[in-house]
Image (cartoon, rainbow, N blue to C red):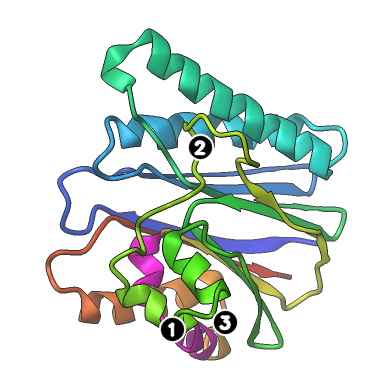
Amino acid sequence: MSIDLFSYTNTGSRELNEDYYVIKENGGRYAVLLCDGLGGHNCGEVASKIAAETIAPEIMNLKEINYGGLYEILSRVNSDLIKRQETNPELKGMRTTVVGCVIDNDLIHYFNSGDSRLYIFRNGEMKFMTKDHSVSQMSVELGQMNFDDIRNDTDRSKLIKVLGERITRDIATIYRPEQCLPGDAFLLCSDGFWEYVLENEMEIDLSKSTSAEEWVKFMLIRLLLKMNGKNDNFTVIGGIIK
């Protein structure tokens, strides 16, 4: 099994890019990580880089990919970010989202904390999407608003789960692994991307693409046409399983 991958990141209208991603491959195992440092918090770009550059190689070193191993890595990184804040006042308050997937032995494992997303597509249609850890997502689950309204909701950026925050609840959601099939596709993106590119547009652009690069570039055209000059950093990683 091989994976055709293409990635792109952009500062958008910001001066600093707080998004950071890492892609690693060894022996047929792939680890794809995307972190988005929280705007308005100190050193979000530091938090996102530390998290991505720590989590990905530790995943690659796991003997077996499972819930326990992944959660231990995420917990350790969360504790490290907290400790750095306590020992360095300049880093106080740094936070980051994380979304990642690991493809190993024809299985895809995935996890998230915050509102960076992972989508999985099969036969050209969206099969799965991670759930945001946000106030808006909670409103959807309580029946107080529709999913399609999240993009324009004022509470969309109020996150209830991120790395770098001392919390007693689970710091991330780790999902049940899925079997990979040739032709399956997956997409990781920060909120600066999915805010502009709708799920049905992702499907349309996938259906007319012959490579991950083509797919991502079709979607980027949509995003660029919708940008209003006030958009956040945006990062996207597309993958097609061969």
Q: Where is residue 88 in the image (x, y as percent from the top left)?
A: 34, 11
Q: How crowded is mark 1: few (under 14 residues within 10 Å), some or many (20 or more)?
A: few
Residue topped by disc 2: 163
SS assignment at label 2: loop
| Label 1 vs 3, first from the N-terminus | 1
**Cα–Cα span, label 1 and label 2:** 26 Å
In depth, the one of 64 and 94 nearer the eye is 94
Quadrant of the rendered image containing residue 16 = top left
Quadrant of the rendered image containing residue 64 = top right
* Residue 99 left/right relative to 242: left
Residue topped by disc 1: 148
Identity of the residue drawn at 29% across and 14% down: 89
Q: In the figure, 50 relative to 118: above or below?
A: above
| Label 1 vs 2, first from the N-terminus | 1
The N terminus, quarter of image? bottom right
Camera sees residue 213 = no
Q: Position of residue 19 (x, y in %)?
A: 37, 47
SS assignment at label 1: helix
Looking at the rendered image, the disc whose residue lies closer to the viewer, 2 or 3, is: 2
Residue topped by disc 3: 210
What is the span of residues highlighted in magenta in the rendered image? Answer: 191-205
Q: What residue type is disc 1 on?
A: Asp
| Label 2 vs 3, first from the N-terminus | 2
**Cα–Cα span, label 1 and label 3:** 29 Å
The C terminus, quarter of image? bottom right
Identity of the residue drawn at 59% across and 52% down: 112
